Amino acid sequence: MTSIEEQKRQEAVKALINIAMLEGVVLLAVIGVYFYTNNFVHLIGGIVGSTLIFGPMFVRWFNEHGKALKAKPNSDVKSD
């Protein structure tokens, strides 16, 4: 794999990790609100809200970076 492909792959993984960590923080906040209020509606609303926020982010990430992760890491040998 060339260095450009490897760099794109690393950027894709880094972007995915950033989105996942941000979603984790939001979900921890949702769980904290649920425990503080003990209201099940807050939990369900927070989960649905985070899905509505982060779902499109994951779709956009896949559209931008999906091809970089589909490349095989050991594809130096070309098949004829």
Image (cartoon, grey):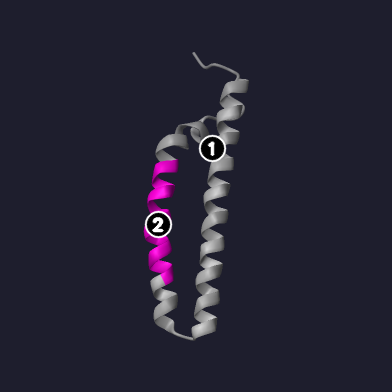
Which x, y percent locates residue 43? 44, 76
**Residue 58 counted in the magenta span:** yes
Q: Which mark is residue 22?
A: none
Q: Which residue, given by chain and number where applicable, does mark 2 sit on?
A: 53
17 relative to 66 in the view: left or right: right
Magenta region's main secondary structure? Answer: helix
Q: Amino acid at mark 2?
A: Ile
Q: Quadrant of residue 24?
A: bottom right
Q: Compared to 22, does 48 lie above or below?
A: below
Q: Residue furthest top?
A: 80
Judge by depth and name the residue closer to the eye, 77 or 68: 68
Residue on which the image places disc 1: 12
Looking at the image, can residue 1 be seen?
A: no
- Say which residue appears at 60% left-offset and 28% top-offset: 7
In the image, taking residue 8 as reference, residue 50 lies left or right, namely: left
The amino acid at mark 1 is: Ala
Q: Residues within 10 Å of mark 1 (few under 14, many from 20)?
A: many
* Residue 34: % across, % down: 50, 79
- Region rendered in magenta: 46-61
Return the disc, 1 or 2, that comes first in the chain's sequence. Answer: 1
| Secondary element at tag 2 | helix
User: Secondary structure under badge 1?
Assistant: helix
Residue occupying image coordinates x 58% and y 22%: 4
Does residue 46 sit above or below 80 in this rendering? Answer: below
Image location (x, y in percent) of residue 21: 57, 55
Rendered residue at 43%/68% (across/down): 47
State yes or no: residue 54 in magenta: yes
Q: Are marks 1 and 2 in contact (CB under 8 Å)?
A: no
